[in-house]
Image (cartoon, grey):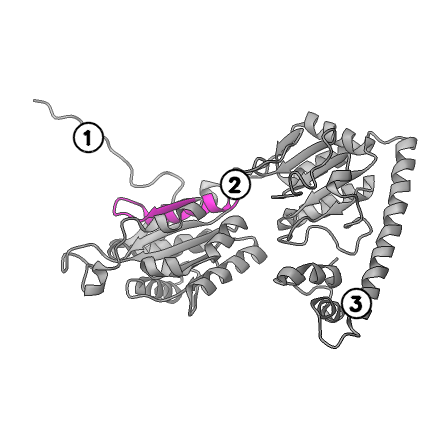
């Protein structure tokens, strides 16, 4: 009988590049660095020495690898990674010890998921290989206790993807793929479990894999021009408009675009709930001076999870509502009672720019006069609010015990204009926001 012809399968695609590597762990840390990860926040474990060895080797040989930052607790490590991703706009990574270290990530996993932070959560796994059968195989009694049925299941509800590195994988490719997923909008965390014996598999001195950017990250999207025109017309004709946002500040370009649109049409901007970032200058005359949602005739919602409380502060039934977000129907949340006339899946900066450019061409003298009257009215309201806030702070300072309001007021006087403020004031957070006077 003739044997079936075997297909010649290449070991690498034509755009993959070659990097120095003697073990799979070398490829893992190289792909991290080439994928934008500058720091690996590391909590040690018996199966994870490969990270320390691979990064030390990379430093001595000039191979790409992130900086290893030793941490004492897993939750702190992941929170450090979240802060790095927030400030740099690039992914960060954390490494912890088997399933118990993954559990110790704790509520930081929730923050990563709900905050859309592109972090790579990694953990070692207890080895499964028979003792003495290969490098990294079982050699301690504790390792039988370190094997859950499915380690990724611990964080699966709070990640965009999870993977256990297997012998048939290309390690560099899998890291790049997870970073591609994490960095594509809506961004979010990914999880990689790495068995000790897999990390220690040998390579022949080099490895080939694609980087995150060679795979490509999904880029921002634009709204349909007709939808942008409809929203612009609603805003130009509105008598009591309101913009609501919680998260567009993740993209500084979106903040600048929103300021231009708000100033063009005298649109008041509100931040419902606890804003994740600075979305609009808090000292601006248009910030927080508008109507309540139930009083607005047009609402433009920009990257907001819950812009009002349904049934309590819902806009009027005849109000026009446009909801712009990378994921406007908020597919990560099961229960959502909000309505909108237009759900726009677009990058906020692109959508705001399109609305502003269209609105500019719709303005005539009557609209400009009406908009100017609203601008003056809101500016006067802002002055009244600032005077009232100042008086409240002075009165609070006369009390025997320091209050959250007074402490926030005094803090605001000390803050430099370019200081980064981390607002964890909880019930006092509104005072921190009021008196920090961020521009």
Helix, strand or loop status at disc 3: helix
On screen, residue 8 above or below 268: above
First to last magenta residue range:
161-187
Residue 97 quadrant: bottom left
* Percent x, y of residue 353: 71, 38
Helix, strand or loop status at disc 2: loop
In this rendering, the label closer to the viewer, 1 or 3: 3
CB under 8 Å between discs 2 and 1: no
According to the image, label 2 marks what residue? 333
Q: Give the mark, 1 or 3, whose residue is nearer the N terminus.
A: 1
According to the image, label 1 marks what residue? 6
Quarter of the image with the N terminus is: top left
In the picture, measured across the screen, residue 351 lies left or right of residue 234, that is left
Residue at position x 40%, y 52% from top?
A: 31
CB under 8 Å between discs 2 and 3: no
Crowd class of label 3 (few under 14; some 14 to 19; many from 20; radius 10 Å): many
The circle on residue 393 is 3
CB under 8 Å between discs 1 and 3: no
In the picture, measured across the screen, residue 101 lies left or right of residue 383, that is left
Is 320 within the magenta?
no
Residue at position x 58%, y 58% from top?
A: 87
> Marks 2 and 3, how far apart in space?
39 Å
> Marks 1 and 3, how far apart in space?
80 Å
On screen, residue 18 above or below 215: below
Q: Give the mark, 2 or 1, whose residue is nearer the N terminus.
A: 1
Q: Give the mark, 2 or 3, whose residue is nearer the N terminus.
A: 2
Is 170 within the magenta?
yes
Residue 245 quadrant: top right
* Percent x, y of residue 181: 46, 43
Crowd class of label 2 (few under 14; some 14 to 19; many from 20; radius 10 Å): few
* Percent x, y of residue 223: 65, 31
């Amino acid at each position: 009988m003739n044997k079936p012809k075997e297909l010649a399968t290449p070991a690498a695609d034509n755009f993959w590049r070659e990097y120095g590597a003697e073990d799979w762990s070398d490829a893992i840390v190289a792909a991290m660095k080439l994928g934008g990860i500058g720091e690996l926040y590391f909590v040690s474990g018996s199966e994870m020495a490969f990270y320390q060895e691979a990064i030390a080797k990379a430093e001595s040989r000039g191979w790409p690898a992130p900086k290893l930052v030793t941490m004492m607790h897993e939750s702190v490590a992941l929170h450090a990674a979240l802060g790095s991703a927030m400030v740099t706009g690039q992914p960060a990574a954390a490494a912890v010890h088997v399933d118990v270290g993954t559990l110790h990530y704790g509520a930081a996993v929730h923050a990563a998921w709900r905050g859309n932070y592109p972090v790579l959560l990694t953990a070692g796994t207890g080895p499964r290989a028979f003792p003495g059968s290969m490098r990294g195989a079982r050699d301690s009694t504790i390792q039988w206790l370190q094997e859950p049925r499915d380690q990724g299941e611990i964080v699966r509800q709070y990640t965009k993807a999870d993977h256990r590195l297997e012998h048939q994988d290309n390690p560099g490719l899998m890291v790049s793929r997870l970073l591609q997923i994490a960095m594509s909008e809506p961004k979010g965390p990914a999880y990689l479990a790495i068995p000790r014996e897999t990390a220690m598999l040998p390579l022949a001195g080099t490895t080939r894999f694609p980087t995150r950017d060679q795979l490509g990250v999904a880029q921002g999207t634009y709204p349909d021009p007709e939808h942008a025109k409809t929203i612009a017309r609603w805003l130009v004709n509105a008598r009591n408009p309101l913009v609501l946002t919680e998260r567009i500040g993740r993209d500084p370009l979106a903040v600048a675009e929103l300021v231009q649109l708000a100033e063009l049409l005298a649109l008041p901007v509100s931040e419902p709930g606890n804003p994740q970032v600075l979305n609009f200058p808090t000292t601006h005359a248009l910030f927080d001076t508008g109507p309540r949602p139930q009083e607005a005739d047009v609402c433009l919602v920009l990257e907001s999870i819950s812009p009002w409380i349904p049934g309590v502060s819902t806009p009027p039934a005849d109000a026009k509502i446009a909801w712009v977000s990378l994921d406007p129907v908020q597919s990560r949340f099961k229960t959502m009672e909000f309505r909108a006339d237009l759900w726009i899946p677009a990058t906020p900066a692109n959508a705001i720019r399109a609305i502003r450019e269209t609105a500019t061409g719709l303005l005539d003298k009557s609209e400009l006069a009406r908009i100017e009257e609203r601008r003056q009215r809101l500016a006067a309201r802002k002055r009244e609010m600032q005077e009232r806030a100042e008086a409240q702070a002075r009165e609070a300072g006369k009390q025997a015990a320091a209050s959250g309001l007074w402490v926030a007021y005094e803090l605001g006087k000390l803050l430099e204009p370019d200081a980064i403020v981390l607002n964890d004031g909880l019930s006092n957070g509104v005072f921190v926001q009021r008196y920090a006077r961020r521009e």
